[in-house]
Image (tube, rainbow, N blue to C red):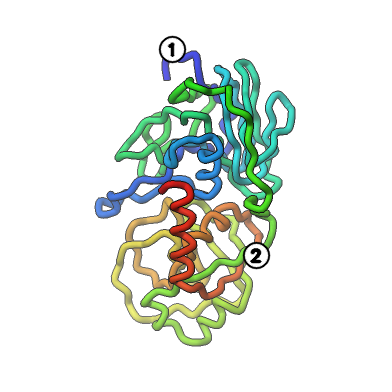
Amino acid sequence: MKNSNHGLRVIKPGPLTLTQDIGRFGFTHIGVTQGGAIDDYSFSWANHLLGNAPNTSCLEITLGQVEFEVLLDCMLAICGGDLSAQLDNCLLNNWSTFHARKGQFLSFKLPKNGLRSYLAVKGGFRFPQQLNSSACVSKDHLGGLQQNGQAIAEHDLIEFCSRSKQIIEKPTQLTFKFRPDYNLPITLRVIESYQVSQFDDQSLQAIYSQPFTVDQHSNRMGYRLSCSQAITVPNEPILSEGITLGAIQLPPDGQPIVLLNDRQTLGGYPKIGCVARIDLPRLAQAKPGQTIRFVKGDLNELQKTWCQWANFFGY
């Protein structure tokens, strides 16, 4: 952004701060993955609290350690993980909107609860669009301010889409009953796939009866899980096929991987099934070392819940 006097200036970019919207769809046949906000629950609330359109671009801040200078009076919202956000060293409420004035400094510290926070602005950020999306996916070299899949960097200038009605609204806050506690153990509901019949009873019992631990090598492509009793992987060869969001694949070591937004588009590892779409935002906030359990989910009930959620936010 050149010769702009409004938006945010990046002072500290943090380890991973990405431009995101809901994702890039319709291109998996050419190897382009979905991308998009990995915790779309928090992403959606950040826009909803501001009255933005459902797919308005936000910043996804992972692991905090970020600082911005505010270059124009604006109204912002923060939702998701608690990264101890501060405005001029005054602590901000999470899951809420707030006013920021020109010359103030907005910062995020290390995570206290959860892993990622979503920063939205009234009217949205002006991020470049590639294949109908601003989603930043490094492996596809798509998205970001430079349109090459790179995270934001020091001295970047981030422009607002609109200045209209930026500061007249009264700040709002999400009621406590809709705010997750990301430090609690996680239960993920599984929709079993057609490949589940290839796993023996002992392997299925190992999936549903033991706890798993989030591995430190987890990322936006997938969450690696470790367990004491490795899952026996079927010997039958499997043709590579399209990989859906939330697929639970079993590599040869028998330690599951739950595939997320930046996943590969094709794969040939056997799959137990998929984590329910409605449960994935909770997984996206899990830190290394947290405990996860799988339970069988009811497809019809989960579809109903997902449709209610999507209709509420206007997707």
Q: Quadrant of residue 21?
A: top left
Asked whether the beta carbons under mark 1 and mark 2 sit within 8 Å of each other, the answer is: no
> Where does residue 299 sit, x and y in percent of width and height?
44, 71
> Where does residue 168 sit, x and y in percent of width and height?
58, 23
> Where does residue 294 sit, x and y in percent of width and height?
56, 71
- The residue under label 2 is 291
Identity, as a three-letter code, of the amino acid under mark 1: Asn
- The residue under label 1 is 3
- Crowd tier of the residue under label 2, counting other residues whose Cα lies within 10 Å: few below 14, some 14–19, many 20 or above: some
> Where does residue 11 sit, x and y in percent of width and height?
59, 24
Identity, as a three-letter code, of the amino acid under mark 2: Thr
Q: Is residue 156 visible?
A: yes
Residue at horizontal 52 percent and vertical 75 percent from the top? 296
Q: Is residue 210 above or below residue 123?
A: below
Q: Is residue 82 left or right of residue 165?
A: right
Structural distance between the alpha carbons of marks 1 and 2: 48 Å
Judged from the image, the secondary structure of the residue bearing numbered disc 2 is strand
Q: Quadrant of the N terminus?
A: top left
Q: Quadrant of residue 50?
A: top right
